[in-house]
Image: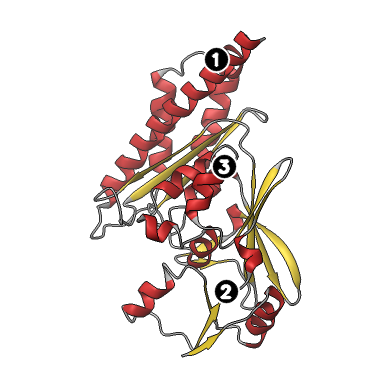
Amino acid sequence: MDFLRPASWEEALAAKAEHPTAVPIAGGTDVMVEINFDHRRPEYLLDLNRVGDLYEWEVGEEAVRLGASVPYSRIMENLRAELPGLALASHTVASPQIRNRGGVGGNLGTASPAGDAHPALLAAGAEVEAESVRGSRRIPIDAFYTGVKRNALAPDELIRAVHVKKADGPQQYSKVGTRNAMVIAVCAFGLALHPETRTVRTGIGSAAPTPVRARTAEEFLDAALEEDGFWDNGKVITPSVAKQFADLCAAACNPIDDVRGTASYRRHAVGVMARRTLSWTWESYRGARRASKGAA
């Protein structure tokens, strides 16, 4: 196994172009596990730790540009207001040591359906900035996951950053695991309210071959909130609406039985998380609405 260690982003792109099978490594929290258990033996490892640009983030007027190697701990500390769903997901990642090393770029590159960041990125409507010596492009998160641990990157492309719109409403994240830390998700769920467009977005992890959205559930809830005037009147969402939303989220799953949980349990748990996160986000929305009216 050869170890490639570029000193700049340009050198990294050149190395990836010359060695398309090279496996990028930054935090190493996924790659090293696979190597240590002999699940993967790449011909080349492409070490990105000296590429400083990958550890930077920029808060713009509408969105955050998050470098691929920005550690989860930095997201928790610095971007909680702008990216609340992703910050909550970051809290659930493994241990403090791994949160100080791992980043969203690694989660995306591995594209495991159980990756903790995926539900939050789906719910927020992120875009992945991919680059090669041929140029740069942005891949909508909905088109990024192409199969089990497969993504839309070309062989010569690297993930440079993730673009996530700043939250315009409450966001939530929930995860089921066999313990409270250092655990792969049995299943996970992310929800984001977007009051500006009067829409909701979801993200489901570890309950299908890829991270997925519950699109039918989103469409149902969008219509229910609009038809009954919930965005305007700020009333409590009725139990029947919450239950239907939860049932549709559970139906969006296509899980498997494995050592962490059964398929039926995963479907049930996703429904429970959907109902609870809807309750939490809607209460936050109602609270913010009352506060703004009081200030006025």
Q: Which residue is disc 2 drawn over?
A: 48
Q: Is residue 229 visible?
A: no
Front residue of this view, candidates 30 and 207: 30
Front residue of this view, candidates 210 and 49: 49
- The reply to whether discs 1 and 3 touch (Cβ–Cβ < 8 Å) is no
Q: Residue at x 57, y 14 (%)?
A: 291
Q: Which residue is disc 3 drawn over?
A: 83
Q: Is residue 81 visible?
A: yes
Amino acid found under the numbered disc labelled 1: Gly
Query: Mark 2 against mark 1, which lies toward the viewer?
Result: 2
Q: How is the image coloured?
A: secondary structure
Alpha carbon distance from label 3 to label 2: 25 Å
Report x, y in % for residue 174. 39, 41
Residue 175 appears left or right of 257:
right
Q: Residues within 10 Å of mark 2 (few under 14, many from 20)?
A: many
Front residue of this view, candidates 61 and 37: 61
Query: Mark 3 against mark 2, which lies toward the viewer?
Result: 2
Q: Earlier in the sequence, mark 1 or mark 3?
A: 3
Q: Earlier in the sequence, mark 3 or mark 2?
A: 2
Q: Residues within 10 Å of mark 3 (few under 14, many from 20)?
A: many
Quarter residue 95 falls in: bottom left
Residue 158 appears left or right of 93:
right
Report x, y in % for residue 253. 40, 48
Q: Residue at x 70, y 59 (%)?
A: 138
Q: Which mark is residue 234?
A: 1
Quarter residue 36 falls in: bottom left
- Label 1 secondary element: loop
| Image: 57 above or below 36 | above
